Image: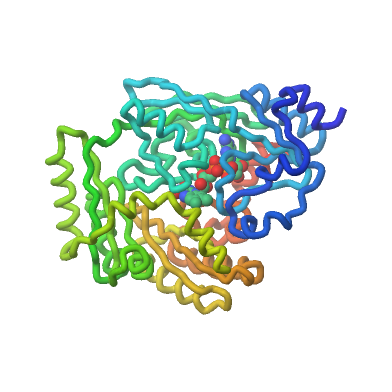
Amino acid sequence: MRPADKLRKLLGDDYVITGWPDILPYTRDYIVTRIHSELDEEVDDGFIVAIPGDEEEIMGILRIAREEGLGVAIYAGGSNVVGRYMPRKRIVIDLSRLCSIEWHDEESGIVAVGAGAIIGELEDWLNRRGWTTGLIPQSISVATVGGLIAMGGIGMYSSGYGGVEDILLGLEAVIPAVGHVRIGPSPRRNLPLPPERLFTSSEGLIGIVTKAYLQAYPAPETRIRRGLLLQSFEEGVERLRRIAHYRARPDMIRLLDEVETQVTFGVDGAALIYEIHGPAEMEDYVEARAEALERLVGRASEIEGVERWFEERYRYMAHLKRLYRAGIAVETMEFSPLWSGATKLYRGMREALLEMDGVIGVSAHIGHIHPAGCGIYFTVLIERDRLGDIYHHMWRRAVTLAARYGGISHHHGVGMVRKPYLELEYDGWVEAVERVATALDPDGLLRP
Ligand SMILES: Cc1cc2nc3c(=O)[nH]c(=O)nc-3n(C[C@H](O)[C@H](O)[C@H](O)COP(=O)(O)OP(=O)(O)OC[C@H]3O[C@@H](n4cnc5c(N)ncnc54)[C@H](O)[C@@H]3O)c2cc1C
């Protein structure tokens, strides 16, 4: 029996997809080179999409992959921007049927959610009940819960609610060498190799997350949103550092460099936007937090148009299309510099990329602050026709520079793009990861 027929027998005809053009959506993610050349990609006959409904079926798919010598790629929301592992002969597991959402324990604020559920759907479900996870990535309408766990994702409200690692309390998964595992939620894990840590940022290497137990919080009933105008990005970085060190973090904070401030608000300087949340009966508490924060920021004038910025944040596709039509490709790169290296990285990156032939613009913002440093996010505008020539060269320059000042990624993950540079940050650790992955997936079904 052919592999596709074995899969049909396991899952039913409706849950196996083969053949062009039905497989087309599964061939893509948001890595910029693929968006710009997806129709040139050669898609071979060995490409089968399987859509399992539970862990048993996932284990059946892995068994068939093993028998047939096929690799397995996981397709969740397809929104990752660093390139997924795509073996040439493969089964692509689409997790969209694993999308249930229910309270695990409402009193403790714990929601049990299928890994294939879209983040936006989870938020709608929670918001209708007066709750939120506070995990709001810009890709909210496409990214899934499992995808965010696997890529170590983070949302714009990270200052208040943290990244996915801070709300992941337990999970279920299928590990090729072990089968179905369930680790129930706990407020703090005290166990060797805690599974939440092991699977966060695992990029699908050690198993397939099928369900997550996530912390939810009462949705904010009152909020303050403000924008302040600072002299320069450098000054803003220093302010962010003080806010982080004095633990005066708002629920959302973002510092735009001079380029992004000019494009967004039409003024000179660097915009610092923040938002603070609280319950209805505690407006004075929210106001007091804003006051404390502004005292740390120091002298600054207020910017107009901040509400509009919040509203337009998710309309990125229209901007991308406009630029694309004008012959411009947009790449984004995020890094984790320590505070001591943040401005050096910013200046160095602009210099290193802008001197490249084909790069026509570099801007940055900081959207995530941590005690020791921040997540800085560069947007690079490239002549569309030059993208193929300079893409890998540009990444090599950028990652090499970032490694000097801190971490080589912040929340987009490693993928195929950063894989060649892992040794820059992780001395000897890559081998350790490979050994763990080999132990949990001895046939290498999930591994590049
Ligand atoms: C416009 C735009 C804005 C974005 N904004 C943000 C942002 O604000 N914050 C942020 O963190 N990211 C952001 N991203 C990146 C992207 O949304 C994240 O990387 C996201 O986590 C990918 O999730 P996905 O469900 O789309 O996964 P996919 O792209 O389908 O898969 C990504 C990887 O995760 C693995 N994987 C997926 N599901 C599972 C699972 N259940 N078990 C094991 N492995 C799995 C896959 O094997 C693959 O390697 C953005 C992307 C775009 C295009």
> Can you give x and y, in whole percent of width and height, for residue 343 in the image?
36, 69
- Answer above or below: position of 317 versus 183: below
- Answer above or below: position of 432 versus 99: below
Q: Residue at 38% across / 29% down in the picture?
A: 126
Can residue 189 be seen in this snapshot? no
Who is closer to the viewer here, 117 or 211? 117
> Can you give x and y, in whole percent of width and height, for residue 384 in the image?
60, 68
Q: Quadrant of residue 418?
A: bottom right
Q: Residue at 67% across / 59% down in the picture?
A: 37
Can residue 13 be seen in this snapshot? yes
Count of numbered tags = 0
Q: Quadrant of residue 136?
A: top left
Q: Residue at 43% across / 58% down in the picture?
A: 336
Who is closer to the viewer here, 172 or 392? 392
- Answer above or below: position of 432 versus 74: below
23 displayed left or right of 44: left
> Can you give x and y, in whole percent of width and height, for residue 296 in the image?
18, 58
Q: Residue at 70% across / 32% down in the picture?
A: 50
Scheme by which the image is coloured: rainbow
